[in-house]
Image: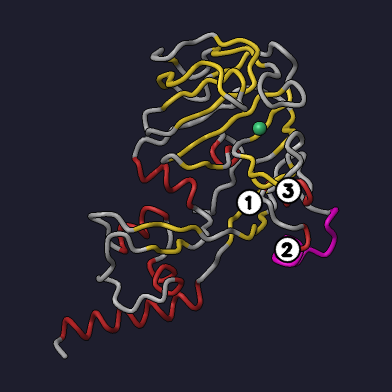
Amino acid sequence: MSFKKKIAFAFLIILVLSSIINAEGFIRYLVKKGDSLSLIAQRFNVSLQELIDLNQIENPDLIYVNQELKIPGNEQKYRVKKGDSLWKIAEKFAVKISSLIKLNNITTPDKIYIGQELLIPANEVKADYQLAFRGQAVNYIWPVQGKISSYYGWRDHPVYKERIFHTGIDIAVPYGTPVYAAAAGVVEFSAWSEGYGNLVIIRHRDNSQTYYGHNLKLLVKEGDQVKQGKVIAFSGNSGVSTGPHLHFEIRIDNRHADPLIYLNNNYLRNNR
Ligand SMILES: [Zn+2]
């Protein structure tokens, strides 16, 4: 074995060993004002018992602001693209290469192929990191202020009466509440859309999109450039909706994301 190969081999062994010690699979969350354990469980679509167990909580009624909780996270799938390496993928998702190797039973890390499906481990810093990785972090402000009446994730749909994935958050606000652009961008859509009612979609500089649904009146048109905070609509109850609220979505790389992870002041950084 050449010296280089020996080094590579030793490195691999270290990676595999460290993955056994470091594999995590949870998200870190800092408790904020108004949180209860059951609200947090609902928001992240995990069971209360899972939260209690993972955090070894003795009294679920006693959580405090800024307490750090571990939230069980879910793995996701990724298909290898041209130009990818395991290192690039690990960087993109802010996961340890060792975790990728372990989770996917990879024996030769330099031999991944286009189209290969990889499992990406759940990770505590993923959301922040993905934005940082783009080098142009978009800072989203709240489009309206109000109580969240429905969180992102699986829920029993109030109209369709079945379990449906809720692709955004619902913020309960009175009819006619001004809706602000969460970040600057270009209006990509502003019209009626089945289900969403009067919908605005804005595309942002990092290519992410925000969706604003169920509006009463739309104030922008396709192609408009909007600044962050511009009033783009008045909220309402149009489309499939059971009461006045704003349905707000963030899509990153054409994938749904939990807005609460991205809206400022709400997520709960790791300790770096
Ligand atoms: Zn909704």
Q: Amino acid at mark 1?
A: Tyr
The residue most toward the bottom is 1
Q: Could you classify mark 1 by the number of other residues whose Cα lies within 10 Å: few (under 14), some (14-19), or many (20 or more)?
A: many
The image quadrant in which ligand 1 is located: top right
Q: Which residue occupies 35% across, 83% down?
A: 13
- Image quadrant in which you'd find residue 14: bottom left
Query: Disc 3 or 1, which lies upstream in sequence?
Result: 1
**Magenta: predominant secondary structure element?**
loop
Q: CA distance from mark 3 to mark 2?
A: 12 Å
At mark 1, the secondary structure is strand
Mark seen at residue 50: 2
Magenta stretch bounds: 51-61
Whether 78 is drawn above or below 4: the answer is above
Image marks 3 and 2: residues in contact by CB distance under 8 Å: no
Q: Could you classify mark 2 by the number of other residues whose Cα lies within 10 Å: few (under 14), some (14-19), or many (20 or more)?
A: some
The answer to if 17 sits in the magenta stretch is no
Q: Could you classify mark 3 by the number of other residues whose Cα lies within 10 Å: few (under 14), some (14-19), or many (20 or more)?
A: some
The answer to if 55 sits in the magenta stretch is yes
At mark 2, the secondary structure is helix
Q: Position of residue 189 (x, y in %)?
A: 46, 20
Q: Nearer the viewer, mark 1 or mark 2?
A: 2
Left or right side of 31 for 193: left
Q: Amino acid at mark 3?
A: Gln
Q: Which residue occupies 57% across, 37% down?
A: 259
Residue tagged 1: 29
Mark seen at residue 42: 3
